[in-house]
Amino acid sequence: LSRRSFPKGFVFGTAASAYQVEGMALKDGRGPSIWDVFVKIPGVIANNATADVTVDEYHRYKVTNRPMRADADLDERRLPKRFDISIEQFFFGLQYGTGKVNWKGVAYYNRLIDYMLKIGITPYANLYHYDLPEALEQEYGGLLNRKVVRSTRETSKTARFDSFNSGKAFADYADFCFKTFGDRVKNWMTFNEPRVVAALGYDDGRFAPGRCTKCKAGNSATEPYIVAHHLILSHAAAVQRYRQKYQHVQNGRIGILLDFVWYEGLTNSAADQAAAQRSRDFHIGWFLHPIIYGEYPKWMQKIVKERLPKFIADEVKVVRGSIDYVGINQYTAYYARDQQPNATTVLSYSSDWHAELVYERHGVPIGPRANSDWLYIVPWGLYKAVTYVKEKYGNPTMFLSESGMDDPGNITIVQGIHDATRVGYYRSYVTKLKEAIDNGANCVGFFAWSLLDNFEWKLGYTSRFGLVYVDFRTLRRYPKSSAYWFRDVITDKS
Ligand code: GCO
């Protein structure tokens, strides 16, 4: 297995998000995001950890890359890197676009991008990774309010969609980034895992802003759908802006990052097979279906009915086809079993699936479990997920934008850097990806999550996903066996 076994131009890289690695909490003019507020609620994050420092990439982005070069001899000229731009670093006023620009934040990303290019790393920039400015949450309810798409006064449902072109909203923030960095950044993504934003933020309340039917505030039967709808429209508005104003000059491409768990029917019964299909529709279909076909999947329309927002004709035009490529975050697979609602079922996004997710069949787990309770190692799941996108969605240009596994946080450096399980994970997943490509999937890259151990949301620092071990007391970086393995693959040495 090596780079040579992949089609010409195939890229290997690593991925990280602003909030999880930057650690410049509220310094240099950054305003608080909904995550800064969320992590402060006692008991919400393991050990009540915060991302105030995390791995301090804000100051150490050079240190991170230098040891990678010297110790692991990673050939960075061949290593694209996916990183996120953080909204709060730019706009901390009351509205995106009308909030003030934080020029220190802009300077940071200019330094980072210039440095990456100087040492030969290709930047892949994503515009939103869970960190909505708290000011927007306070002012109008954040993603629940359509102002997040366009901030011009809300008009009737028949308002022309392109009126949000003149609005001050997500598209304006995106526009600012295209204008400021697009001379150097040629690979853009709008949102990371919008499904997680909607489901974890508004259905089970596990992620910021922590809303759900059982939480202090929220409604799991309606809010996830409203938020998802606004995310799709915001994505489309940003893409439209890029295409109209920048793409022909800057020659870049733009897409979105979608998480995709593979769902396999628990049995061959028609009921379980349908449950697996519903699960796929409520998961990746929720976003990819509108983007490719201009409407929500049939199963969703049938079950969610009037709780599901609709795209008006002018919106369909902008949403459909709003990607040049799509990033798939693929880690795991589950079995799905038919589960029809009964009198006691509480209406919610997850109960709408009419499916129960299970992790074993005849007492055999679907795969070995990593440290995270949701992460079972199932390489064939990646093959099926990629092949599904190929077959169901017209084989769009895609790349594996995240894949990886975690170890417990409290292991020593020595235990941490001998990460044989992770090496095995990557070997098997990358092998399956190659099989899918050999069978025609139009997949052009693979990005490991993540280069460094970092702040893993609810798990705080009790989970390590890195190719490089971080000693969280000293913040020193130590390449793991998986970093060397990765190097060997991408430099054709293995
Ligand atoms: C994402 C992911 C990452 C996680 C990773 C491991 O949204 O892209 O949630 O931020 O850290 O998937 O859980």
Image (tube, rainbow, N blue to C red):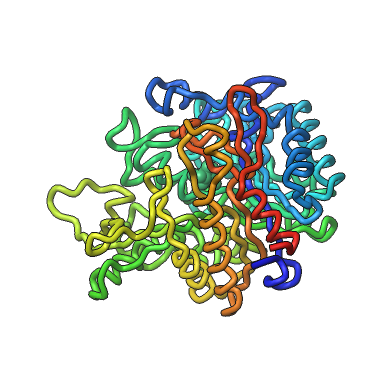
Foreground of the two, 340 or 60: 60
Q: Relative to the observer, which residue lies in front, 368 or 50?
A: 368
Is 297 left or right of 328, judged from the image as shown?
left
Residue at image x 73%, y 54%? 187
In the picture shown, does residue 477 fall above or below 353? above
Q: Nearer the viewer, residue 46 or 233?
A: 46
Q: Nearer the viewer, residue 388 or 246?
A: 388
Residue 475, how many percent across, how many down? 64, 27
Q: Residue at x 72, y 36 (%)?
A: 64
Residue 447 point in image, percent of width and height: 63, 54
Note whether residue 59 is visible.
Answer: yes
Q: Is residue 155 at all visible to an observer of this figure?
A: no
Q: Is residue 224 left or right of residue 397?
A: left
Tell how many labels: 0
Instruction: Identify whether 36 is placed above or below 162.
Output: above
The residue sitting at the bottom extreme is 439
Against 455, is 149 above or below?
below
Image quadrant containing the C terminus: bottom right
* Residue 55, percent from left and from top: 63, 30
Pick the quarter of the image with the N terminus: bottom right
Q: Residue at x 42, y 22 (%)?
A: 41
Residue at the image position 42 percent from the left and 50 percent from the top: 375
Snapshot quadrant of residue 112: top right
Quarter of image, res 7: bottom right
Q: Residue 27: give x, y in percent of width and height.
A: 68, 20
